Image (cartoon, rainbow, N blue to C red):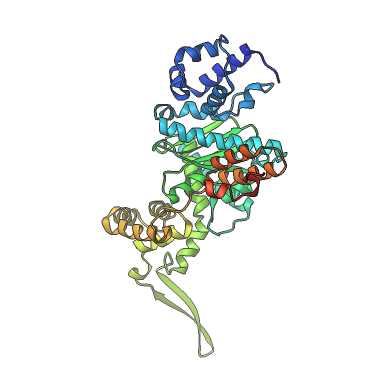
Amino acid sequence: MTITQEELARRLKEARERAGFTQEQVASAVGLVRPVIAQIEAGKRKVSSLELAALARLYGRPIHSFFDEAFEADGISYVLRAIPEARRDPEIQKAMNRGLEIINAILDLENKLGVNRLSSGPPCIYARNIRTKWEAIEQGQEIAAQERNRLGLGVAPVGDPASLLDAQGVLVLGMELPSGLSGFTFRSGEATVCVINSTDPSVRQRYSIIHEYCHALSDLKDLPAIVSRKEGKKDLREVRADVFAACFLMPENAVREFLKRQGKAIPSRIQAPLMIKDKVVSYEARRSEKQSTINYMDVVRTARYFGVSVEASIWRLFNLNFISEKQKDLLLEQDSSLPGKAIKDILRKKDAGLDGVQGAIFQNATEHLFYLAIEAARKGLVSRNKLIELLELAGIQDEDIYAISEARRTK
């Protein structure tokens, strides 16, 4: 679509205001002065292609959206406005810009290739009003059970949650977010995107992915996006998503079966029918308290099995009445003690390997960008230089990029 300079100026101003930026902040971010931004938005100065690319990146939009027939609000504008910390921290802003650039590149490549994977993401199938905290808790439990049943998960623990969401057409991206944020979920066109804080520990990232998945399933019918703050526990939608994540990752039946296999969470009295002199006699015995009591190492094993934090495991066992409030408080105290921290540190090093480096965050976005970029290059839809740019955006190292035949220079 061809638009006038005045219309482009209007759209640029609208995009800035939707994202919550001042002209001064925009000027600082893109290396211009405020009067120049004012002139561009007034239609008194043309914007160069490089300046437009920088502005689009800052506003989290693909460049072509400024020339589309309809210039509509996008979920990412809502997100940017809801995270003022990013506008104050250049490093966070840079990380978010890169993340949004990855998302837009994926959507653009899917459009070029005629792929509709992301447009087939899950609808908001569990949208329900919440009036009280109790309703939020009940809905979180019900939705988790219904979704596990819909996905045919049974009582199996969730392996890689990003892969699970990927199968549902949801894009998952790890992004460096301010410390108070665990993630956000938004729609971009028909695509559903869940972003998690890549600076969080891996078990927290797993939890956040499922938490955000609940928002995708329940909250995007009337909202373009939703931002999850770690202190936002009074928001009933956050309560519902927290309960959903706990129940989805640690279903009651699965927890019960796991504990039984460890000889825990079973009745203190056991009965067994025995055949004695052609008669069936019911034999009863009392199991020792020490044998059946859940201790700290049981909690650690449970957390490891279900892929959650030890703290989350303790609270889940308490909410399922497997431990008393007194036991819960004692276990939480042990978890924060030096011996508890030492155990977790040993296991963390074991997971990371001898070098002590943690593995990659849970996500599928950069891998999708990698595959899509190569496919587009093979079909002649992007140039060699553009392919290299996309592979760099996906985090591929130079030595690996030039090992790809499509990226090699031909004579």
> Is residue 369 placed above or below 304 in the rendered structure?
above
Count the marks: 0
Q: Nearer the viewer, residue 222 or 209?
A: 209
Looking at the image, residue 181 sits to the left or right of residue 104; the answer is: left
Q: Residue at x 50, y 47 (%)?
A: 245
Q: Residue at x 59, y 23 (%)?
A: 49
> Is residue 411 placed above or below 274 in the rendered structure?
above
Corner quadrant of residue 56: top right
Q: Residue at x 46, y 38 (%)?
A: 133
The C terminus: image quadrant: top right
Asked if residue 284 shows in the view, the reply is yes
Percent coordinates x, y for residue 268 in the rendering: 39, 69
Outermost residue on the bottom side: it is 277
Percent coordinates x, y for residue 115 in the rendering: 70, 41
> Is residue 218 placed above or below 50 in the rendered structure?
below
Percent coordinates x, y for residue 246 in the rendering: 48, 49
Q: Nearer the viewer, residue 114 or 397?
A: 397
Outermost residue on the left side: it is 338
Looking at the image, residue 301 sits to the left or right of residue 73; the answer is: left
Q: Nearer the viewer, residue 337 or 373?
A: 373
> Is residue 263 placed above or below 165 in the rendered structure?
below
Corner quadrant of residue 344: bottom left
Asked if residue 124 shows in the view, the reply is no
Q: Nearer the viewer, residue 265 or 232?
A: 232
The N terminus: image quadrant: top right
Percent coordinates x, y for residue 247 in the rendering: 50, 50
